[in-house]
Image (spheres, helix red, strand yellow):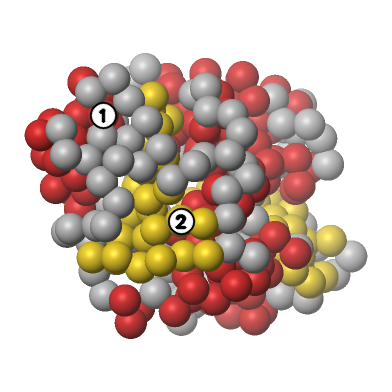
């Protein structure tokens, strides 16, 4: 059986390491997993070419929203978030799921966060920010503030909030209204969050918990500043690990060997 991760750019992806480690541990010797460069324009043809020898696909930017209209059925969570990072092929149909949300929740709980998040500040307004909002909702918090550069481009986030039964307040990216959140979630590239690293170092924006979705390079400037300030930090690798584990379970029908996958991923990242 075949599986793959799609996106653009995709060469950096750690997903093949995680999924292949899982297949080996599960004894799925006839399964393969590769990284395929694919943009929005190329997605329809690629999906059409996936026959009965394909188990599923992992999707990263910029495909998580685009794929929704190409699926036969969409899991309620993926529908509410407005993004599917997983496609499973079964019985001649395409099924869409979102494992980013449970991946975020597990990454936060592993880091020691339990119960409602309290005051939440999300950096960014894209598909990953929508998943972050759903994760916060899953932890029991129905309100969040999102720091965005262009409010006009946050329509998908606001729509996701309505579907999730949550409330989002938009604020300026460089000068957010929230200065001491209980939880800060950064969904932006590493360098884009450096201004917040400086503010944490300066003591005027210090969260209690941080989730930074970046996993390479790690630690980011934001995570480093947060650790210096005594903030509880969850990184992008645990999130990636647990969303990948969810995908393995969906595609294979077998329980994912999380610790085997963790060890393989950490080894690939140099520890």
Q: Mark 2 points at which residue?
A: 144
Find residue 243 and report its horizontal and vertical position in percent. 59, 42
Q: Quadrant of the C terminus?
A: top left
SS for callout 2: strand
| Residue 193 seen in the figure | yes
Q: Is residue 30 left or right of residue 167?
A: right
Residue 148, compared with residue 152, is above or below; it is above
Residue shown at 26%/75% (left/top)?
Answer: 150
View extreme (right): residue: 91
SS for callout 1: helix
Disc 1 packing (10 Å; few <14; some 14–19; many ≥20):
many
Q: Which comes sooner in the sequence, label 2 or label 1?
A: 2
Q: Is residue 17 left or right of residue 212?
A: right
Find residue 50 and report its horizontal and vertical position in percent. 69, 67
Q: Mark 1 points at which residue?
A: 226
Residue 116 lies in quadrant: top right
Residue 268 lies in quadrant: top left
């Amino acid at each position: 059986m075949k599986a793959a991760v799609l996106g653009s750019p995709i060469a950096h992806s750690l997903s093949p390491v995680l999924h292949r480690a899982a297949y080996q541990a599960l004894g799925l010797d006839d399964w393969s997993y590769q990284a395929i460069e694919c943009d929005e324009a190329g997605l329809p043809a690629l999906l059409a070419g996936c026959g009965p020898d394909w188990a599923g696909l992992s999707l990263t930017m910029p495909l998580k929203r685009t794929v929704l209209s190409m699926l036969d059925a969409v899991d309620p969570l993926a529908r509410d978030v407005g993004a599917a990072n997983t496609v499973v092929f079964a019985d001649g149909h395409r099924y869409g799921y979102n494992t980013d949300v449970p991946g975020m929740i597990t990454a936060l709980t592993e880091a020691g966060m339990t119960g409602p998040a309290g005051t939440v500040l999300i950096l960014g307004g894209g598909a990953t920010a929508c998943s972050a909002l759903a994760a916060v909702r899953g932890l029991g918090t129905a309100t969040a503030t999102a720091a965005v550069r262009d409010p006009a481009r946050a329509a998908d986030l606001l729509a996701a909030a309505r579907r999730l039964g949550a409330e989002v307040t938009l604020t300026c990216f460089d000068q957010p209204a929230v200065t001491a959140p209980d939880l800060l979630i950064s969904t932006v590239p590493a360098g884009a969050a450096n201004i917040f690293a400086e503010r944490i170092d300066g003591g005027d924006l210090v969260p209690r918990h941080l989730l930074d979705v970046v996993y390479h390079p790690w630690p980011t400037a934001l995570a480093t500043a947060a650790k210096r300030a005594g903030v509880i930090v969850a990184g992008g690798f645990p999130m990636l690990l647990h969303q990948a584990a969810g995908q393995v379970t969906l595609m294979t029908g077998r329980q994912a060997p999380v610790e085997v996958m963790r060890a393989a991923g950490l080894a690939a990242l140099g520890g």
